[in-house]
Amino acid sequence: MSRDEVLVTCADAALTFGRGTRAVVAVHGANLEIGSGDRLAVVGPSGSGKSSLLHLLAGLEQATSGTVRRATFLGPYDIGLVFQGESLIPALNVVENTA
Ligand SMILES: Nc1ncnc2c1ncn2[C@@H]1O[C@H](COP(=O)(O)OP(=O)(O)O)[C@@H](O)[C@H]1O
Ligand SMILES: [Mg+2]
């Protein structure tokens, strides 16, 4: 895989939970491009939509509007997600938990 290969592209991606007066816009207008070898940190206060954005990138949620495109050569096991909380093993470090 060459360094500049684009893996995931978000164009105006939005994710809204619920409808009407109960609608919660978790992600709005996300625009980003992730290339092979990139390391990104998504930072923001609790509830600002970090997990929702990661779910969009991983394909666990469908964008309510806009697009999230993953490179066609990516297979189902090429995107991994480590969930926070109970899924982490305290005795292991970050790399070990991720593995
Ligand atoms: N499944 C869901 N149903 C309804 N609202 C949700 C759901 N998941 C997240 N939200 C809401 O979306 C917003 C962003 O949440 P989240 O992506 O978990 O933020 P973060 O990971 O930055 O703490 C919050 O207001 C949260 O309550
Ligand atoms: Mg979160």
Image (cartoon, rainbow, N blue to C red):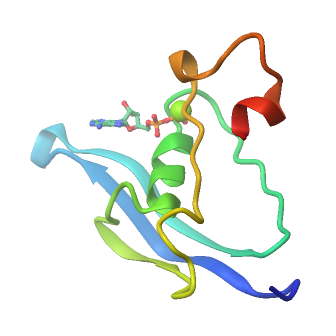
Q: Residue 57, relative to residue 42: is it above or below?
A: below
Most foreground residue, 11 or 73: 73
Q: Specify whether 88 is left or right of 58.
A: right
Q: Quadrant of the C terminus?
A: top right
User: On the image, which quarter does residue 84 sit in?
Assistant: top right
Figure quadrant of residue 45: top right
Q: Residue at left 77%, top 11%?
A: 91
The image shows residue 42, relative to residue 83, as above or below, that is: below
Q: Residue at x 70, y 47 (%)?
A: 42
Q: Residue at x 54, y 65 (%)?
A: 30
The reply, left or right, for residue 40 in relation to residue 11 is right
Q: Position of residue 41 (x, y in %)?
A: 77, 48
Residue at the extreme left of the image, as rendered: 20
Place of residue 25 in the rendered image (x, y in percent of width and height, measured from the top left): 35, 48
Figure quadrant of the N terminus? bottom right
Measured along the vertical axis of the image, is residue 16 above or below residue 44? below
